[in-house]
Image (cartoon, helix red, strand yellow):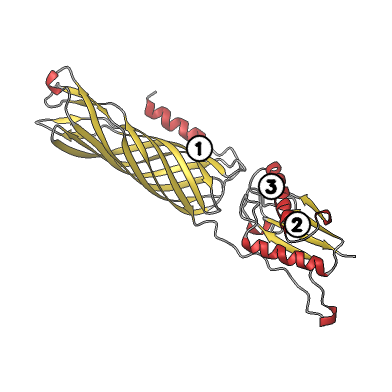
Amino acid sequence: MTRRGILFGTALAILVPTTAMAAPEGFYVGAGAGVNWTEDADLSDYPTVGSGLTEKFKLGGIGNLTAGYASAMGLRAELEFAWRWRNSVKETQSSNPALNGLSGKTSSIAFMGNALYDFNTGTPVTPYIGLGAGIAQVRQHLNGVSDKDWVFAYQGIVGAAYSMTDNLALTIDYRYFATLDPDFDLGPVTSKGEYRNHTIMAGLRYSFGAPARAMPAVATAPAAPMEQQRPQTEYLVFFDWDKANITPASDKIIGDAAAAAGQVRAVGIHVIGHTDTSGAPAYNQKLSLRRAEAVRRALIAKGVTATQITVEGKGESQLMTQTGPNVREPSNRRAQILIRVS
């Protein structure tokens, strides 16, 4: 079986979904840059029929732009524009001594359609694999003459994304990119070349599919007469995805809770941490406890006696908004502050 057949067969087999769905779902755009290494290429019938040489190349650069859609099942489909440039010829080798040591360079632009699959690990790191097919313009410059040819292109992709926020991810991947043999008019006859390329690239991907959602309002009873009004005894603090740090908005709520505890002369404060369903249950249990501990430390910093506070983590077992597994739901990423009064 050819290397091309192995590449496509292996990628198709791995792309079959075997793990839980990955998030976020929706449209996204991305951009990346990195380095590329072009494999040694044979150039046949140069400069005449029966002649030929082998080109060896230096490292070059790559930049790409992508736009696509991620499904709830972890599958992504995207369009990609990529430019691989300035792979200068390091040396040429030929049985004809006159063809040794020629100068030149090669480059390509490609328009690709890619299919990828994200593996949800329950952490901010999401590995992915994929394959792509499209069309590429390969340009060859050799010994002062240049030509280009449009040919079928294909690639295999292996990488990982790190979610910095619900919408923004840092990506790094390896790509094997190759084309059918391009034809170049570099002399009296048409020469047939080769183009096979290895790429390492880092980039950013922004998803439009996880917009910020308003947190649910806490229902309150009608206002009582002034002499009967008492501070509320339950407060909700919300967190960013996979985070346990206190935001400025949450810090204000915790301050209100600390002040209320002093007004009602609380006998105890119980903090319960929660998560959404994205990620593994065991990981979410630990994350929920970290959130409760973060709130406890903030309450102490605002004057609440440490011995008054108890904490508990519920993981994903008590959802405010019911969802399926592996769903990023902002209203479920919370901690409850319950003030007990005598």
**Callout 3, which amino acid?**
Leu
Q: Is residue 64 above or below residue 52?
A: below
On screen, residue 242 versus residue 61, left or right, reads right
Mark 1 / mark 2, whichever is N-terminal:
1
- On-image quarter of the C terminus: bottom right
Q: CA distance from mark 2 to mark 3?
A: 20 Å
Q: Secondary structure at mark 1?
A: loop
**Residue at 79% in and 71% down:** 231
Question: Toward which corner of the image does residue 194 lie, by quadrant?
Answer: top left
Question: Percent position (x, y) of residue 174?
Answer: 43, 35
User: What amino acid does circle 2 point to?
Assistant: Ile
Query: What's the amino acid at mark 1?
Result: Leu
Query: Which residue, given by chain and number where applicable, does mark 2 sit on?
Result: 300
Work out which residue is located at the far top of the displayed protein and give it. Answer: 95
**Residue 76: % across, % down:** 48, 46
* Nearest to the observer: residue 268 or residue 208: 268
Q: Choose mark 1 or mark 2, whichever is in front.
A: 2
Instruction: Residue 257: give x, y in percent of width and height.
Output: 75, 65
Q: Nearer the viewer, mark 1 or mark 3?
A: 3
Per the image, label 3 sits on a secondary structure element best described as helix
Task: Depth check: give the residue in front, 45 or 175.
Answer: 175
> On the image, numbered disc 1 is attached to which residue?
15
* Vertical position of residue 148 compared to residue 329: above or below: above
Residue 274 visible to an observer of this rendering: no
